[in-house]
Amino acid sequence: MKFLLVVALMLLSVLSYSGTNHEGTCSKITKVCVNYHSDSPFVTTQEARFKLFLESSDQKQVTFLKADLWMQMGNHGHGSSPLKVTPIAPGEFDVTKAYFVMKGTWQIRVTFEQESKQETLIIPVTVTQ
């Protein structure tokens, strides 16, 4: 019985991880939210691929400008090579060529424009292996 319970809990955690969006962030100024979805955790040993979503809670037009990866380390930081961002649908983008070159806390930084206001939102992500 315990074995079945453990298997059921493991299956539930895998399904809930793969089918939901990961943490995101929202702007109090522009009412725009950015979040991402990845089918697998980010690691240092291979290219990361994920979907990026931009949504405006007040239905105003949002224009994606750029996304990059950044890791702040004391007085300096580390970035990654340019990401390849491909539009899929309004507010939805496929991101490839994302390389997290070391373990630690990284930032997915997304810059957009809404009604002539440019803003950058940051989503923290942790790379553990």
Image (tube, rainbow, N blue to C red):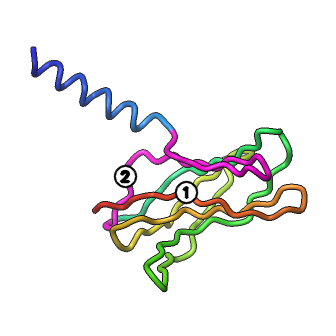
Reading the image, the residue beneath label 2 is 41
Q: For the residues carrying marks 1 and 2, which lies nearer the camera in this image?
A: 1
Q: Main secondary structure of the magenta part?
A: loop
Reading the image, the residue beneath label 1 is 123
Label 1 crowd (10 A; few <14 / some 14-19 / many >=20): some
In the rendered image of this protein, does residue 28 appear above or below residue 75?
above
The kind of residue tagged 2 is Pro
Dot 2: what SS? loop
Q: Residue at x 41, y 38 (%)?
A: 18
116 or 90, which lies in front?
116
Q: Which residues are magenta?
A: 21-45
Q: Position of residue 99 (x, y in %)?
A: 44, 69
In the rendered image of this protein, does residue 70 appear above or below residue 55?
below
Asked if residue 75 lies in the magenta stretch, the reply is no
Dot 1: what SS? strand
79 or 29, which lies in front?
29
User: Which corner quadrant holds the C terminus?
Assistant: bottom left
Number of numbered tags placed on the structure image: 2
Q: Position of residue 52 (x, y in %)?
A: 60, 51
Q: Quadrant of residue 63?
A: bottom right
Left or right: 44 as drawn, with respect to 68: left
Image mark for residue 60: none
Most distant residue in the top direction = 1
User: Which corner quadrant holds the N terminus?
Assistant: top left
Q: Residue at x 18, y 19 (%)?
A: 5
Q: Quadrant of residue 48?
A: bottom left
Q: Position of residue 29 (x, y in %)?
A: 78, 53
